[in-house]
Amino acid sequence: MEEDLMKDKKKLEHLAIILDGNGRWAEKRSLSRSLGHKEGSENVVDIALYAKKRGIKYLTLYAFSTENWKRPKIEVNYLMKLLAKFIKDKTNLLMENDVKLNIIGDISKLPDKTIKSCLDVCKLTENNKSLVLNMAINYGGRSELVKAFKDMAKDGLDFNNIDENTISSYLYTKNMPDPDLLIRTGGDLRISNFLIYQLAYTEFYFTKTLWPDFKYKDLDEAIDSYLGRDRRFGGLNEPS
């Protein structure tokens, strides 16, 4: 029984990744930032399918934050077009590999073409079960919590009876386990308003590797680091 408990603590079911470094990857090669984003987008499905092979059931990727609108308009416009094209071009691959695409964030602010691409592929893949691929688009952790509490108010919930489970059920990630491991590429040591409620007991792994250069071996190293950690969730492990 004790061995089973320890095995559950080490189980990696939900992986979250902050995809950082596309622009710097391009600048290091004297390329446009747009080409860096394109290269980074090609890495998404490769890593997602490898994560599935490693037994991961949920993969949540931070693709575009609520703060990213502050970037130059030409870059934002390119990202919106790239997103629509990426989702459309990868549909068959998602279907072939039994991957369900799920969009988290307020996509109502996106261009109509991008919204349609997102909704169409989410609908098409909704019954796939091998991997849930959450793409966080126009997502912010604080805005997610604001939305959750507004929705609870609209539903007439008695705030005296709200608990952690209630809050979780109003988040974009409802019916999913919280992330076990968060990886951030690109060298920065912060979570940047990503899944701020869900990451309460998540293990963090930071790497200087830029997202387009993040490959299978890098994911293996992150997973190995996670599996070697002692997860106590605020308690103490009894000595053997």
Image (tube, rainbow, N blue to C red):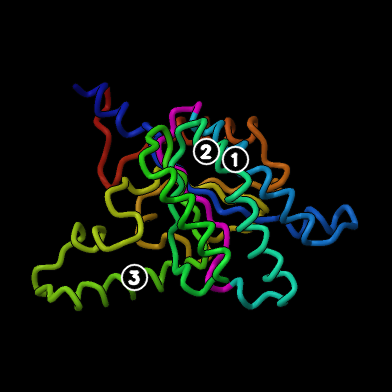
Circle 3 residues within 10 Å: few <14, some 14–19, many ≥20: some
- Mark 3 secondary-structure assignment: helix
Instruction: Judge from the rendering whether residue 210 lies leftward or rightward of residue 48; answer left or right.
Output: right
Q: Mark 1 points at which residue?
A: 45
> Height in image: 86 above or below 240?
below
Contact, CB < 8 Å: mark 2 with mark 3?
A: no
Label 2: which secondary element: helix
Q: Where is residue 29 in the image (x, y as percent from the top left)?
A: 88, 52
For label 2, count other residues whose C-alpha is less than 10 Å away and answer few (under 14), some (14-19) or many (20+): many
Determine which of the numbered discs, if any, sits on residue 145 in the image: 3
Quadrant into which the N terminus falls: top left
Would residue 51 be found to the left or right of residue 197 on screen?
right
In three-dimensional space, the C-alpha distance between marks 2 and 3, rounded to whole angstroms, equals 30 Å
* Viewer can see residue 181: no
Left or right position of 122 against 117: left
Q: Do callouts 1 and 2 mark residues in contact (Cβ within 8 Å)?
A: yes
Mark 2 or 3: in front is: 2
Residue numbers of the magenta segment: 53-67
**Disc 1 on helix, strand or loop?**
helix
From the top left corner, tell me how far across and down residue 208 is, in percent: 69, 49
From the viewer's side, name the closer residue of 189 and 15: 15
Question: How many neighbours does mark 1 have within 10 angstroms: few (below 14), some (14-19), or many (20 or more)?
Answer: some
* Disc sitting over residue 94 in the figure: 2
